Structure formats: structure tokens, C-alpha cells
Amino acid sequence: MAGRDKGESAATQAADIDDAIPGKPTPQPPTAEEPTEVRGPLPPKLDQDAPETVSCTGQATGVDRARMAQAGPFLTTVQGNRLPDTDHSLKAGPRGPVLLQDHHLREKITHFDHERIPERVVHARGAAAHGVFRAYGTAAKITKAAFLASDVETPVFVRFSTVLGSRGSADTVRDTRGFATKFYTTEGTFDLVGNNIPVFFIQDAIKFPDVIHAGKPHPDREIPQAQSAHDTFWDFVTLHTEATHHTLWNMSDRGIPRSFRMMEGFGVHTFRLVNAEGGTTLVKFHWKPRLGVHSLVWEEAQITNGMDPDFHRRDLADAIEAGALPQWELAVQTFPDTPEQTFEGIDLLDPTNIVPEEMAPVQPIGLLTLNANPTNFFAETEQVAFHPGHLVPGIDITDDPLLAGRLFSYLDTQITRLAGPNFAQIPVNRTHAPVNDMTRDGFHQDAVHTGVAPYRPNSLDGGCPFLAGADTGAYIEVPVELPASKKVREAPASFDDHFSQPRRFWLSMTPVEREHIIGAYTFELNKCYEQPVKERALRVLANIDPELCEGVAAGLGLPSPEADRPLASVDPSPALSQIGRSWPVDGRIIGIVTGDNGDLDGVRDLRRRVLDANMVPLVIAPAGGKLDRNGEPITVQRTFATARSIEFDAVLLAGTPGPGKDAYGARDAKAGDPASTGPTRTDPRVLLMLSEAYRHGKALGGWAGAEAVFQAAGVPTAAPGVALGSDGPATLNQVVQLLGRHRVWERFSADA
């Protein structure tokens, strides 16, 4: 570098180079520890400026633009009142209910709820479907909810979503997924608003704006989109260690599902069920997919985001259209409703906790089937409004402080997002039970109310509406007795354990899954700019497990720290692993590669057999149109130019297809030079597809000379999961057996 003092050390020179690299998030580097010395806001970065200070009519005010930003060293309300605490809601005792008088909670959540219009602040990108829920009747002893009685069928609308990304973001990012179900019951609407991860980042709803602000794109550049691989997210979760459990789930394969159809759902919170006799039971809700829980591998997800950013919503819609109807069983874990609201030492009010299935079995209570796609995405998927407070008799809430804030936030959010208080009148949100609510007027009022007395008591409308009693289906909250308490902003001591549950999750993973977790942490933290944030993250990981910490530290090029507390002594929960079981193959996508010189009779037979197995065959050929040689024409669904391995669960070769006419680099860079493919003269894009599929652990098969093509692609034909048969049906039989395990996991072993 010109002009550098020769006396400068190499370390100083390296630091200057680092400073010159774009992407530095703040004007001053942070410290590894949370700062405690009181100081004012940092100045803007040198590359930043603010709007000119003019009035709303364009008159210059002369005010310094820097003074338009926040001021003062202390956290305040929007009215300037200094705050002593913004981490805990005001409750009646550490374990008591949240108090409505908590003005700071309401101000903080209200402002957060209205920060963005018109898309959702979180869960903006979603896909949805209609369906039906049929109850088994097995929950009748623990709840009087009518829709859970034996063989009752209830219409539903289910919306899946990512949390962080905007409406235009990609589907297969590493993120938490929403799993929200609206039951249109005869007693009113019940919304089960959950995620595909059973725990959350925070224990108290007052922290929700903080975690989302940290996870969203950096506010100065609005990047990165739909990712947690950046400084603000990791700065928050490494300082706020109650987020550790959820973060570990996100860094596991759970963070990148193969499909919404192959994704678990969880109610996250502990709910209270009430039976016909008034008895109560605490429960956690689970959705168990019939197809099993499966994920993408990381490289596969990255390719998918470029090749098909709509992968998940397309998969859901296509499966329903093809008749491979997605199904989940609704199930519950049950716990005695004791005053302590704990189970085997696990605090049931802490939403960062799970109860292992080995300790409390998951008991099925009904079957959900999605059977219809929306007619209009905006009218249904975009305008549907969920709310955890949409309850029915027999289902009540607990004093979980995260749930308490959600009961306010979801309702409040709709007022801005759907332009007023009458969002329940939008068709997709309308209850299927009779409504006489005395609410009137407001934006978008569609009901034409009669009568003159929307109040109680009245005589002018004949006294109607009347109050219901327990014998006439009224919703009555469980009269839980509260101990004597004082108003405090505190959490119970049981909320302080932030590492034993993450350690249980880590110990429950197979070696392959552990490697994926290490890779995810390494990728995400290497995307961070600030070294202290990475060092702090390693200190958190050291308190989970040394293998995890050392693996990530090696990828970051940093020393692995020691744990600062004894490692928790916990038993693994095999139910947390996605590997080791076999599942139905309904809806799996089978890519069949062929060409004009391929075994077209075999392809015709194979397509029929794939469809008969309730899977989807997609024929891949050098060009579009139809393949027609002495028989029924075969429609080509994908070409060598448009197909990529990520779309298929298995790839079968019907012979040795030659290169397409567009197989040259100027037309398609993936094609490269066909002459380099050797004596098979196979299209290079087919070889790329096979090598990717092999690398991602997918089942491969072929016949009629396919062995030579595999060898040209660098795929060992004797490797696990490579099926060579005498014809298409024989090959398919082997592949179906492999698909039941989702991937050929042996290929991911250390010596593979």
C-alpha cells in the first residue's frame, strides 16, 4: 500500500486491509463482552448520510442532520422516560400472569407490530392450502372441545412460512418455519399457531422485537435477505443465551426442510385442556408428518435458492394437484396440571424447553389432510389472519410470558396489516359459527347489522344478544388460583438454565447430523464481520459440547475456548434425530433421464409404475416436446438445460443419452465442452446432475448401459445407493427401498 510507514507491524497492516473490506457493520468494533460503560449513540459510518432536514412543505430547517437520530445514553420509552428493564414483562410474581397495566410492554409490542406495511413483519413469505381434520376421539377424556370428539371432521386452512424473509425471498433459506392451522369449528375458530421447531429464541414476549430486529437485514443496507448469517443476529443470540437452544435447532438440518410436507409442527407453548367434568391437563401440541421429517443438505439448498426460489410452495401445490395429499397427525404430550407447572424438573412455562418424547409419549388425537390449493393467493394465503387467542371451549392458555405477549401482538398486528378491526370478515378469516358480537362500523365493515342497541343490557332489541353459560357453550377461562405476589419485572430462577436442553439436542444427533450442525455454525459465523462476535459464539458453544465448539473453531481459524461451567448431565432423546427410520414415499419426485436413443419402452413402463406407487415421474431429455419412436409419445417435462439434481429425490438413467444440441458453453455454461465427456458422449449437464445427486446422498439407478454414464460422472457403481438393474421396474424396486430412508446416509460417513 502506497505511503505505508515501514515501521508498522504486519498485524497493523493486516488490520488496515480488513478495515478496507466493505461490509463493516458499525463505525467502531465491538467488544466480546457486553459493553457496560455508559456512552451515547455511535456516530454514522463514513459512507452513511441522512436526509436533508426540511419541513413537510420543503422548507430548510437548518437542523444538523445527525440530530434527527436517537439521542442520549439511556434506553427510554417513546416519550423519553428512562427504563430500568426491557427484558421482562410486568407480572404478578416471577411465575405469575402478565399484567395488562404493563405500559412498556404494550408500547414496545404495539410499535413493533406496526413497523411494516402491508406485508407481515415476520412470516411474510408463505404458502397455504385448504384441508380437513378428522379427530380420532382419543382426546375426549382430556378436553371437551367439540372438534376433537370421535370422527368429527373440521375444515381447516393451513399456512406455512419462513420467519425472516420478505414476501419476495427464497423458500429454502436456513430459517424457522411457521406452521399455522385455522380450524373452522362449530364452536368458533381455533388457531394453532406454531413453528417447525418446538422451542423459541426468547422466554418473554417483550424480547420479540429485539430478536426479530437482530435477525432481519441490517437496517443501513437491507442485506442480507432472509438469512441469519450476519453480525446483528449472532451479536444478539450470543449475548442473549436463552436463544441458544432454538439457534442450535436452526443450525441443524431442521433449519432447511426438504418440503413443507416433510416438516414437523409444534405449538411451542404449554396449553391447558379442560374436559367435560372441569378437570384440567397441561399439553404440548405436535404435528407429525406422515412422510417423516426430512431436510435438504446445505449445498442442495443453496443451489435451490438460485434454480427455484419457490421450491417449497411449488412442492406443496404440485403434491396436492398430483393427488399425493399431505397428511399430519395432531398429537399431544400430556402433563399433570400441578401448581408448579413443571414435569420431571422441566419448567413447562419456559418456551425454550422441550419435554423429550421418551419421558412423555406423543399421543395421536387426529389426522390433518390438505386437499385443495387456494383459488387466489392474495385473498386467502396473504389475507389469512391467525391469533393464538382464537380459542374454543376445552382449550385454555397458561402463564407462559411469551404466549401472553402473542395474545396481544397478533390481534394488534392485523389492525395495520389488514386495514382495520374488521379483518375477521375477510372470507378466509370468517368463523363457521354464528356471530353476534356487538362490534360496529370501522374500516371495511361488510356486515349489515340490524337493530338499534349494540350494547348490553338493552330492551330495545329485545335483550338480544344474551350471555351464555357453561351449559350453553360459553367459553369460560379456568379459574386458576394465584398465590400472593408483588409486581416485578423478573423471570423465575428455572428460566436461567440455557445450556442443558441444547446439550441434550446435540447428544441426540447422529454423527452425520452433528457434522451438518458444525458446518452450519461455521458457515454462518464466517459470514460475520466482527471477530469478537465469533469469539463470543465459541464461548457459548463450549458450554454445549467440546466437539461442537472445536469443530466450529477449526473452521473459523480460532482457538477453542473451555466451558465456563460444568457440562449438563442429560440423556439423549433418539426421537430428536431425523435419521434411522423408514417412511412412505408418496409424492417423491423421480427424475428419468433419457433421449431419442434411450429405452423408451422402458421409460413408458417406468412412468406408470412410479405413478402407481403414488410418486411423480419427470422425464428429462435433451430438448422439450415429445419423444416418439414406435409407440406412445412420451412428454418431456424437463430438459438438460432446465433440470438440476435438487428437484429430484432420485434420478434414474434409461440408457446412455447423448448430448443435446444446445450442449455448448456459449448457450449454457453448465454444458462446457461435450468432447471432454469421454467415449459415452453423455451430455455434461447429465453428468453434473448425477455428481450432485450422488454428493447429496440421493438414490441413483439405471439400466441399459447406464453404468458407463455413472463412471463418466465419477459415481462409483459399487457405492451405497447406486442401483443397476436389468430394466426399469427392477431398478425402481431398489430405488423405492432407498427412498424410504430419504437419503443414502452411508455416503456421508467420514471415510466415504
Image: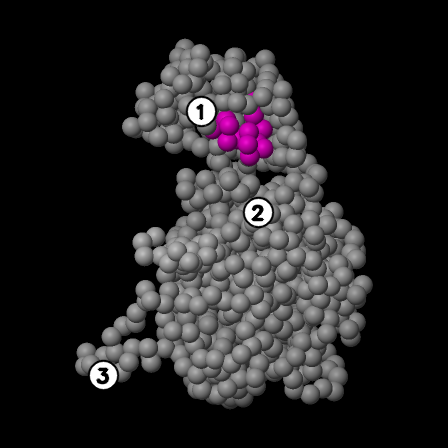
Residue 247 in the image, given as x and y percentages of width and height: 59, 57
Residue 200 is covered by the magenta coloring: no
Task: Give the SS element for disc 1.
Answer: helix
Q: Residue furthest right?
A: 344
Q: Which residues are magenta?
A: 689-701
Task: Give the SS element for disc 3.
Answer: loop
Q: CA distance from mark 1 to mark 2?
A: 33 Å
234 vs 328: above or below: below
Give the amino acid type for the residue marked by disc 2 in the picture. Answer: Gly
Q: In the rendering, which numbered label is found on residue 686?
A: 1
Give the amino acid type for the residue marked by disc 3 in the picture. Answer: Thr
Label 1: few (<14), some or many (≥20) within 10 Å? many
Q: Earlier in the sequence, mark 2 or mark 3?
A: 3
Taking the spot 53% from the left edge, 67% from the top edge, the residue there is 31
Label 3: few (<14), some or many (≥20) within 10 Å? few
Task: Name the residue that disc number 2 marks.
Answer: 555
Q: 486 left or right of 216?
A: right
Task: Name the residue that disc number 3 marks.
Answer: 61
Give the amino acid type for the residue marked by disc 1 in the picture. Answer: Val
The answer to which of 542 and 598 lies nearer the viewer is 542
Taking the spot 65% from the left edge, 71% from the top edge, the residue there is 400
Q: CA distance from mark 2 to mark 3?
A: 52 Å
Residue 544 in the image, given as x and y percentages of width and height: 69, 56
